[in-house]
Image (tube, rainbow, N blue to C red):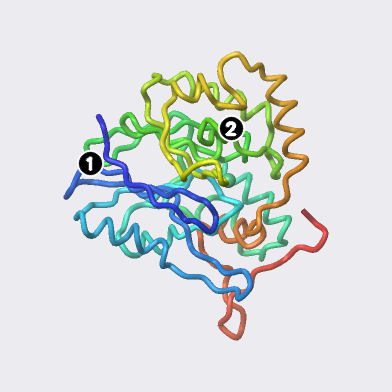
Amino acid sequence: MRPQVEAFLDPDTETWSYVVFEGTGGHAAVIDPVLDYDPKAGRTSTAGAQRLVDFVKRHNLNVDWVLETHAHADHLSAAPFVRDQVGGRLAIGEHIREVQETFREVFNLEKEFLCDGSQFDHLFSDGETFSVGELEGRVIHVPGHTPADMAWLIGDALFVGDTLFMPDGGTARCDFPGGDAGTLYRSIQKLLALPEQTRVFVCHDYPGDRREYACQTTVGEQKHHNIHIRDGVSEAEFVRMREARDATLEMPRLILPSVQVNVRGGNMPPPEGNGVSYLKIPVNRL
Ligand SMILES: [Fe+2]
């Protein structure tokens, strides 16, 4: 089974979103759609996500799922907008509940905020299967970057979220609340155990001036060439490298607005008495 995959880059946050589909007129899943957000003005826009919606409509696709690999810390999710426009069930990994607990405390969210994942239509567990029309999907729990990360294997296409980047980009950071480098190492071994020709689609790419943006590689290329975790790198070596590197990284520019929206399934906080939603900034907390 070889699904077709259309990739969409959000240049502002260097995020890749995907439409995975059987073919024109067939079934589809949308993965990690991005809501544009201007932090200077506190203004959102659906212009970027509209590209995915337009693609779905142009190809007459029947969207079964809108999938989030995890609660992103670098961009806001456009999943509610995409679902409103083209349908599909919004899903994330079941460990989102732990992430919700963490950020309910960080942001002192309202009493009515539930940490039960009910903001999503479905919570997936490790090993669960699903279908996108005739395509078979399987969920692989890959904690380490956050506790809730899931990789989606649809046919021969593996959507790795924030675990592996392109081979020359290495791996995702592990210093967010609930992150752990050793856990990420063991999660990535599950992905690298898949057939070498499995197509790998990354959630981010940070090429700088080295090369053009890229989104697609293979399990084999990762095993042989990933600069952080290719064959032969031990867990201890990886953890040492990952923790030293994480200690040098700044927080992502949009982490504060992103996580408080994304634990709500991409919805804004309830509006206040004047009808306006407000995002919070916890001072000296992160
Ligand atoms: Fe992430």
Q: Nearer the viewer, residue 244 or 118?
A: 244
Q: Quadrant of the N terminus?
A: top left
Q: Position of residue 104 (x, y in %)?
A: 68, 56
**What is the three-letter code of the residue carrying label 1?**
Glu
Residue wearing tag 2: 170
Q: Nearer the viewer, residue 252 or 93?
A: 252
- The residue at 44%/41% (across/down) is 214
User: In the image, 110: left or right of 85?
Assistant: right
User: In the image, 109: left or right of 266?
Assistant: right
The quadrant in which residue 82 appears is: bottom left
Q: Position of residue 122 (x, y in %)?
A: 43, 47
User: In the image, 213: left or right of 23?
Assistant: right
Q: Is mark 2 within 8 Å of ligand 1?
A: no
Task: State the mark number for residue 22.
Answer: 1
- The residue at 47%/39% (across/down) is 202
- The residue at 56%/16% (across/down) is 231
The quadrant in which residue 241 appears is: top right
